Amino acid sequence: EAQVTQNPRYLITVTGKKLTVTCSQNMNHEYMSWYRQDPGLGLRQIYYSMNVEVTDKGDVPEGYKVSRKEKRNFPLILESPSPNQTSLYFCASSLAGRFSYEQYFGPGTRLTVT
Amino acid sequence: AQSVTQPDIHITVSEGASLELRCNYSYGATPYLFWYVQSPGQGLQLLLKYFSGDTLVQGIKGFEAEFKRSQSSFNLRKPSVHWSDAAEYFCAVFTGNQFYFGTGTSLTVIP
């Protein structure tokens, strides 16, 4: 089954404790992206990757890191989480190229930083 | 700066009534345009997309959207709403490398 998986689905952590949220897709998609969803703000893009070893900042990259060492995986790293990073996070992937970019979304990771 | 505006935060319609959700974008060229739906506690599902060509596009679940270049709009429509359409709807644009989403419109359907 074609899918985007995220782990963990729920995470409660404390300020400053490094964490990683994994994202994996099995569709051989080139484009991958991370979003955060906050009430009243919709989805905001954190980082995106056009292909392996190619990543770039989205609208809200502060406090986050990513890497794209393999095509299927795109982990999101919070090196020193703060309470303002409490949010619902989505990973998404799509084919890249002309008439592409129909994103498939993961189920989401609800992060609480205390 | 690029932006997407969904002016209606919340809409309530009766089951069987027609629906139109508004979306306006700010971008210098014609972007790729998308509508997604998010049911409570769920991820996002693509409803429909516009890349180029015919300005009226059909999607899943009986939804359609019309691209109007002169108004920088991509409004979502459905002729007859079902109770299962109650959800949050997001308009999104792709500008060649980045995605921008609107803040969403929450749809309530009254029996």
Image (spheres, coloured by chain):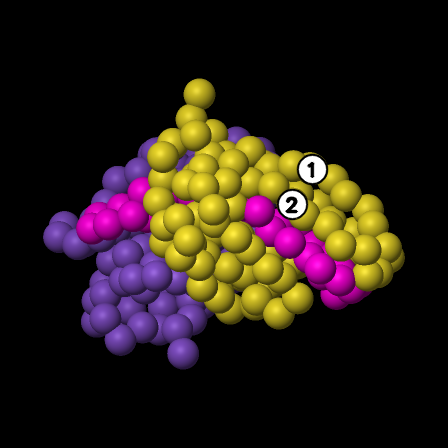
The residue that mark 2 highlights is: A21
- Point out which mark residue B70 bears: none
Query: Please, is residue B18 above or below residue A63 in the view?
Result: above
| Position in image of residue B89 (x %, y %) | 49, 49
In the rendered image, residues at marks 1 and 2 fall on the same chain = yes
| Position in image of residue B81 (x %, y %) | 44, 37
Chain in yellow, by letter, is A
- Looking at the rendering, the stretch of residues picked out in magenta corresponds to A75-102
Residue B52 visible, this angle? yes
Q: Amino acid at mark 1?
A: Pro
Please identify the residue farthest to the bottom as the structure is shown: B1
The chain holding disc 1 is A
Q: Residue at x 13, y 52 (%)?
A: B53
Q: Quadrant of residue A37?
A: bottom right
- Point out which mark residue A8 bears: 1
Please identify the residue farthest to the top as the structure is shown: A1
Circle 2 crowding by C-alpha within 10 Å: few under 14, some 14–19, many from 20: many
CB atoms of marks 1 and 2 within 8 Å: yes
Circle 1 crowding by C-alpha within 10 Å: few under 14, some 14–19, many from 20: some
